[in-house]
Amino acid sequence: MKILDFGRRVLGLAYSPLQEAVLLATRPNELTPEHADLCERWAGRVPSPDAPPSEVVVITGRQSGKTGYVAATLVLHAALDPATVEGLDPGYHRDVLLVAPTQRQARIGYQRIRGLVMSNAELRRYLKGPPTQHELEFNFGVRIGVWAAKGANLRGTQPRLLLLDEACFLPAEGARADYDIIEAVRPGMAMVPGAQ
């Protein structure tokens, strides 16, 4: 199932055309001509299906729905992306992570993610156990984790997808908080084909 169809049918989400284009930029093989035009107009380029981007940066204003959008993006990628679990050794998880500058902001994102999963019987049946304080674990090897922006929290993870919510506030949490996060996850991401 395509990512926009899954979001609409399974999660009941409604996206603006620009939100759709940003989401599809992470999956360029699903870009329509209309979405490609939006990418060209707003980003100055169209992602190639042969070389999906390793990073997508979205800058939005306050109260634009970005935390809800980020939560939905994490759930969509965790549930749909077969590359998430390809080559996964038994006993390991493939992480899909949301990182926010503070624990309070991370909790807001987690409440949205948990709400999307727990309100959907189809997704709920794939949960390996009850949600923990920071994670939802699925029985197909994917774990959605939500953490405050500390590099030590992220060491040892192998994220398929990492989303930084409120990234502009990361330096306020420490002189090198943004760099520490990237340095903590880069080794694990290098082990995951197609990590973003």
Image (cartoon, rainbow, N blue to C red):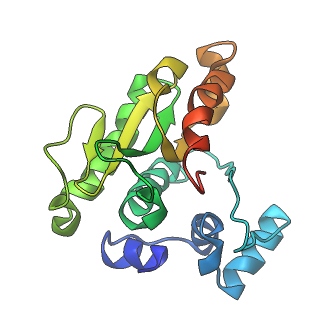
Q: Quadrant of residue 75?
A: bottom left
Nearest the eye: 91 or 18: 91
Q: Nearer the viewer, residue 90 or 107?
A: 90
Q: Is residue 10 left or right of residue 118?
A: right
Give the image location of residue 19, x and y in percent: 58, 66
Residue 31, image x, y percentages: 64, 79
83 and 168: which is toward the camera:
83
Q: Residue furthest bottom?
A: 33
Residue 171 location, quadrant: top right
Q: Does 127 sit above or below residue 32?
A: above
| Quadrant, the N terminus | bottom left
Eyeballing the image, is 13 above or below 32? above
Furthest-right residue in this view: 44
Where is 136 relative to 132, above or below? below
Res 5 → quadrant:
bottom left
> Above or below — where is 32 with respect to 76?
below
How many tags in the picture? 0
Which residue is drawn at the image coordinates 58% and 55% (left, top)?
Answer: 193
**Which x, y percent locates residue 99?**
49, 34
Name the residue: 64% across, 18% down.
172
